[in-house]
Image (cartoon, grey):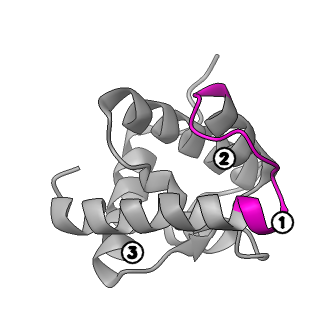
Amino acid sequence: MTPPFSGAEWVRLKACLSQQAALGQGLTYLALAEAVDLQPPHRIHRLTLALEDSVRADHAAGRPLLAALVHGKSGLPGRGFFDLLAELGRYAGPATGPEAAAHYETERDAALAYWREAGTDL
C-alpha cells in the first residue's frame, strides 16, 4: 500500500498540529488539509489515513494522540477515529452523542497538554 503522505507532507502535518497544540486549540479536517496544502484527489481521505497512522504510532509509544486535535464540522472526529480507538482498546462507546463527546474531550485535552509541552520536538 502506498503511504498516504509524502515525507514533506508529514513534516507539514506535524508542524501544523504542533502549532495548534501550542495555541491550545484544534482544527477541522478541512482546515488541516488546507494548512498542509494537500492537493486533490482524495485529500481528506489521505489525511484521515495519515491521522490513523499517527494515532497508531502515538498509542504504541504511550503518548496522547496528536491526531485528537482534529475534528469534523460537528466538533467531533469522524466515526473512524472512534472505531480505531475501539480497535486499540482505548474506547468502547458509540461514535456519536454525549459519551463520544466526553471521551473525545478527554483525548483532546490530554493531547493539548502533552503536545504543548513537547513543542516542535515531534
Disc 2 secondary structure class: helix
Residue 6 drawn above or below residue 106: above
Q: Residue at x 74, y 37 (%)?
A: 83
Q: CA distance from mark 2 to mark 3?
A: 17 Å
Relative placement, left or right, of 102 versus 45 is left
The quarter of the picture where residue 71 lies is bottom right
Question: Dot 2: few (<14), some (14–19), or many (≥20) neighbours within 10 Å?
Answer: many
Q: Residue at x 31, y 31 (%)?
A: 61
Amino acid marked by disc 1:
Gly
The tag earlier along the polypeptide, 1 or 3, is 3
Does the magenta run of residues contain 96?
yes
Q: Residue at x 56, y 27 (%)?
A: 3
- Do the residues bearing badges 2 and 3 touch, measured as CB atoms within 8 Å? no
Amino acid marked by disc 3:
Gln
**Residue highlighted by disc 2:** 48
Mark identifier at residue 97 = 1
Q: CA distance from mark 2 to mark 1?
A: 21 Å
**Whether residue 17 is visible:** no
Give the residues drawn in magenta, as a range. Answer: 87-100
Judge depth for marks 2 and 1 and give the one in front: 1
**Residue highlighted by disc 3:** 20
- Residue 111 spot, x, y in % from top left: 39, 60
